[in-house]
Amino acid sequence: MVFLIGAVQFINIWDFVMVMPLGPDFARALDIPLSRLGLVGGAYTAAAAVAGVLGSTFLDRFDRRPALAVAMTGLVLGTVAGGLAWSFESLLAARVLAGAFGGPATSLSLSIIADTVPPERRGKALGAVMGAFSVAAVVGVPLSLQLALWGGWRVPFLTVGGLGLLVTAAVASSLPPLRGHLARRAATLARSPLFRPLVLASYAMTAITMASGFLVLPNISAYLQVNLGLPRSLLQWAYFGGGLISFVTLRAVGRLVDRFGSFRVGSVAALLLILAFDLAFVDVPRSAPVVPIFLFVFFALSARNVAYNTLTSKVPAPGERARFMSFQSAVQHVASAVGAGVSSQVLFVQPDGRLGNVPALGRMAMGLTLLLPPLLFWVERGVGRRSPPAPTIADPLSGGMASTPKEV
């Protein structure tokens, strides 16, 4: 089950992370201005945010196996449609379709793991599933860029769509029925209000983290090529290095977070990220090589994300975790869409073909990142003051966990 859910996440994340690096390729083919590439990334995240909010109202009413199969089918159709797009508008519509089903696929995948894996093994299982992000970054993005060199920009979309179809068939045929959450659904209706000050602060932290990243991330591929002169033939190796840096950083910095806390580690990571944004987008050293600066950005992003994600996982009580995750997913995607949309409005294409206003975008990302340490401090202090949650007991109907009478 963990392997299948990991495969679902791998396809879902691969579909998402390959689009922006391929941006200059399909922009040339479809006559899309480079300054509008942020809208392509924003279309997916905006659709995923809306789907996350809507899905939180009805997804728990169904067996998770067919629900995940339907979500994956929609994601596959959106990915294949992207590979068949003939204009900016048709590509935008395809990314909206992919996001509308990709968002619920992520929520359902994590819910299945939480429902079926006992707490003493759940961390390892979630780590394995979330490791799909690192694998997609290390393998998926460079492979997509190489496939585009060999056969054109459409080939990566069609390849991911074909593999996604195989994973969808495996989900529909191999996963057991997953209805245990239905037996507990009535008990979840009497939980405490979700939107407490601590939760709202966590959502604000999420919004700042995602918006600051997506001000620059959708434009990195175009920026590296047209502004900094990185040859297209080396782009996949730059992303391979960035993915590898992220893979190592996620594990190494995670240990530091466990030892020193999210506020200390996250604050240092935020300061490093501000420096990285400055070197990459504002005061770019003329003599410095391009790739090391790019790798420094990804190292700082990964270090910040470890501290932030570890802290947000401690905010919800066990009985409200599903709702918290659904709304946090919506906040993540809305903030990402806003960041990508703002970048497309700030940037413009200069007469020489280079992107203009990049330093302004970098300063905006730096300013948002500067707001993160106070929020990390606030949320970590709130989590530390909260009384420990009541113990849980195994639920034999679902293989998951049920609240004790005290919790209910």
Image (spheres, rainbow, N blue to C red):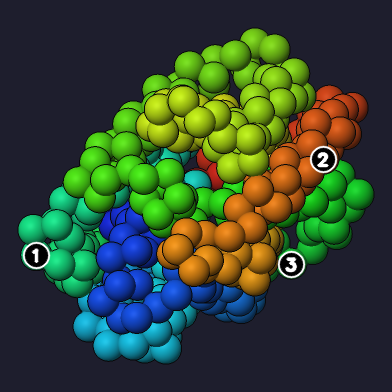
Q: Is residue 22 visible?
A: yes
Q: Is residue 236 above or below residue 121?
A: below
Disc 3, SS? helix
Q: Amino acid at mark 3?
A: Leu
Of residue 250 and residue 141, the one placed in the foreground of this image is 141
- Mark 2 and mark 1 in contact (Cβ < 8 Å)? no
Q: Which mark is residue 393?
A: none
Q: Amino acid at mark 1?
A: Gly
Disc 2, SS? loop
Q: Residue drawn 17% across and 60% down?
A: 148
Mark in the foreground, 3 or 1: 1
Instruction: Please provide percent x and percent y for residue 31.
Output: 34, 81
Q: Is residue 375 above or below residue 114?
A: above
Instruction: Please provide percent x and percent y for residue 93.
Output: 42, 85
Residue to which mark 1 is pinned:
151
Of residue 292 and residue 54, the one placed in the foreground of this image is 292
Q: Is residue 234 above or below residue 4?
A: above
Q: Is residue 127 visible?
A: no
Residue to which mark 3 is pinned:
189
Please tell me which of labels 3 and 1 falls first in the chain: 1
Mark in the foreground, 1 or 2: 1
Q: Residue drawn 46% across and 25% down?
A: 288
Residue to which mark 2 is pinned:
371
Toward which corner of the image does residue 13 lie, by quadrant?
Answer: bottom left
Instruction: Please provide percent x and percent y for residue 342.
Output: 67, 66
Cα–Cα gap, marks 2 and 3? 35 Å
Instruction: Please provide percent x and percent y for residue 389.
Output: 76, 34
Of residue 24 and residue 186, the one placed in the foreground of this image is 24
Cα–Cα gap, marks 1 and 2? 44 Å
Please tell me which of labels 1 and 2 falls first in the chain: 1
Toward which corner of the image does residue 160 lie, by quadrant?
Answer: bottom left
Q: Residue drawn 66% across and 53% down?
A: 361
